[in-house]
Amino acid sequence: MSKEVHTKKYDYLIVGAGIFGSIFAYEAKKRGKKSLVIDKRNHIAGNMYTESIEGINVHKYGAHIFHTNSKNVWDYINQFAEFNRYTNAPVAIYKNELYNLPFNMNTFNKMWGVTTPEQAKSKIEQERKNSKIEKPSNLEEQAISLVGKDIYEKLIKGYTEKQWGRDAKDLPSFIINRLPVRFTYDNNYFNDKYQGIPIGGYTQIIEKMLLDIEVELNVNYFSNREHYDNIAEKIVFTGMIDEYYEYEYGILDYRSLKFEHEKLSVSNYQGNAVVNYTEREIPYTRIIEHKHFEYGDQENTVITKEYPASWSKGDEPYYPINNDKNNELYRKYKELADQEKAVIFGGRLAEYKYYDMHQVIAAALTKVNKEFEE
Ligand code: FAD
């Protein structure tokens, strides 16, 4: 039997220096494998990227709060950074009225003056009955049937319409199958056991993962595909799966975002890391004040306004639109991907999934196990 001869320079070409690609590179290196990581952006860390501005770690692609229920995932990420005790407790502003999120006793107290869970429950029940909606046929009816008109009009309608760029009446009801409602005075946005922000930002995590691994930035795999296909035994691809297959079945849709970062000469602009603006007339959905993620006491501050945007080919893809049409399209691409022997697809773009960081970590470790342990 002839022994397999490896003649290529690298074991793995990893397309994308986000968390998926970086975990794969790190784990491969631990097992003696050599990788080249490429990214078309001018920095590593993908959407988790943070950059120090005025001594503040700015989340350049929107607020990133780490949360997970998995002890494995939590222990894994804690190898690379120390996390603080940050708990996400966003507030919503609607025409100068301020409400706590997620919907909880603080929100209900402000909205209706109720003080006990009993009172809040009966108020919501009464609102539901008043709505007289039995079979919701769009997002507006669905939301009203779940939480009533007051919360819908002040806190859901404008925000959702901005996010999707359409009237709530024209959006399908399944987008909000349920709305989390909490009958305690607890403003913690997440229910997970573990939560925090890495002290010093996220980029250091990826720097540590990619230590002593070759990285090329500002390189698009597709501009030199033939070359890259021939330098490694296998490819780990974390870009867009439809692009990988040259859109042969069609284009997968996304929603995009625009971020407007501003330095301000005040020490505390809004008193909270995340403030949602729920009126439709205000074009952004939220303002992030980054220093509050790490309890910063810098002299100045940096804020980011987040504007939802439509997406067309060439724009930054942020949120997959997992409707039937796109899911079916993705299924066809996945069928092709499943047949590949030397390409591993992973991460939010290659799997066309809205993935939080902890989910990407779990998915990457599963792929690592499959590759090296089976
Ligand atoms: P990415 O980080 O997108 O990395 C993929 C990389 O591949 C990119 O750097 C890209 O430039 C590169 N690439 C793509 N195509 C090519 C190519 N052809 N050639 C070369 N390079 C290429 N998660 C949370 O857990 N908590 C949060 O609070 C949270 N908030 C979020 C807020 C926003 C606004 C967004 C957009 C996401 C948020 N997430 C959050 C999700 C989180 O960003 C992702 O789960 C994670 O970053 C995905 O990692 P990834 O490696 O799959 O993809």
Image: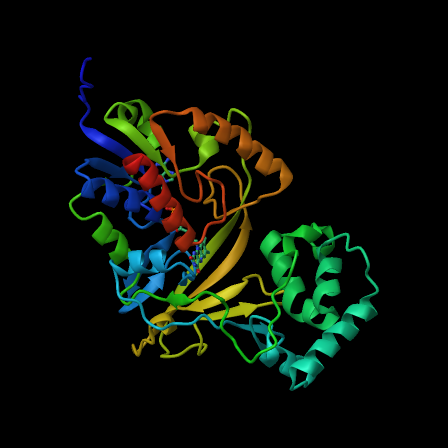
What residue do we see at 26% from left, 66% from top?
Answer: 82
What residue do we see at 32% from left, 71% from top?
Answer: 84
Image x and y of residue 64, in percent: 41, 60
Image x and y of residue 347, in percent: 41, 43
What residue do we see at 68% from left, 71% from top?
Answer: 151
> In front here: 106 or 44?
106
> In front here: 81 or 302?
81
Instruction: Identify whether 19 is placed above or below 126.
Output: above
- Tell how many labels: 0
The quadrant in which residue 2 appears is top left
Instruction: Identify whether 285 is placed above or below 320.
Output: below
Image x and y of residue 292, in percent: 38, 73
How has the structure been colored for display?
A: rainbow
> In the visual, does 277 lie left or right of 370?
right
> In the visual, does 258 lie left or right of 120?
left
The quadrant in which residue 33 appears is top left
| Quadrant in which the N terminus is drawn | top left
Farthest residue, direction top: 1
> In front here: 285 or 30?
30
> In the visual, does 35 lie left or right of 182?
left
Image x and y of residue 56, in percent: 30, 68
- The answer to whether residue 251 of the structure is visible from this angle is no
Instruction: Identify whether 318 is placed above or below 340.
Output: below
| Quadrant in which the C terminus is drawn | top left
What residue do we see at 55% from left, 62% from top?
Answer: 285
- The answer to whether residue 247 of the structure is visible from this angle is yes
